Image (cartoon, grey):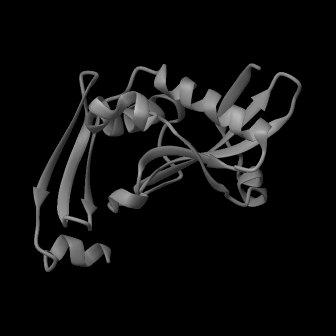
Amino acid sequence: MEYKFRVQTEEEQKEFNGGAHICAIYDFFKYAKEMESKIPLAFGQLKARFGEPSYLTKNFENMYSYNLCAEAENGEKFYLYAYCGPTGPAIGGNSGDESTEKAARALADYIIEADPVDYEIEAYYLDGPCRLVQGVKDGVPYSTEEEIEFDDPALAELY
């Protein structure tokens, strides 16, 4: 089935009640050796397709979210969200519905096909703890990681 993807309207965002993880944007088992570069790449591709996210934080495990809609050829709408969570960039929605799951996988393919925009972002990962700098420069994704102390002032601002 073919879909058109777009950002949800404000009215749709009020109606959409969230959901659960459906699929990763980049499947871990398919891209395991490249995952370090796929995490920043996905955000650059999302920005290329949908602009700025609905929200953006410096918490790596909850860094951004996009409220999206997939419209099928028959007019049916599927409310989804693309986000960066604890396992990386993913698609969420009504995970118990087969049609929504198909739309989510089509959305992941649509994102992967995009040429990323350049960006740079700083985020924090508590498991280290560490400071991450990731982005895309001239189409090439990058990510650096620096261990920090739990009493780091930047970390204290976030939590």
Residue reaching furthest right? 74
Q: Position of residue 139 (x, y in %)?
A: 28, 22
Say which residue appears at 48% left-offset and 19% top-offset.
113
Q: Is residue 150 left or right of residue 10?
A: left
Q: Is residue 40 left or right of residue 9?
A: left
- Relative to 149, say whether 16 is above or below: above
Residue reaching furthest front? 29
User: Which quarter of the picture shows residue 6?
Assistant: top right
- The quadrant the C terminus occupies is bottom left
Q: Position of residue 110 (x, y in %)?
A: 56, 24
User: Which quarter of the picture shows residue 41?
Assistant: top left
- Relative to 128, say whether 140 is above or below: above
Please state the total of marks drawn on the protein image.
0
Say which residue appears at 67% left-offset and 57% top-offset.
19
- Relative to 155, say whether 95 is above or below: above
Q: Position of residue 11 (x, y in %)?
A: 77, 53
Say which residue appears at 20% left-offset and 53% top-offset.
132
Q: Is residue 139 left or right of residue 67?
A: left
Q: Position of residue 107 (x, y in %)?
A: 61, 31
Choose between 39 and 46: the one closer to the eye. 39
- The quadrant the N terminus occupies is top right
Say which residue appears at 51% left-offset and 51% top-offset.
65
Choose between 109 and 5: the one closer to the eye. 109
Q: Is residue 16 left or right of residue 51?
A: right
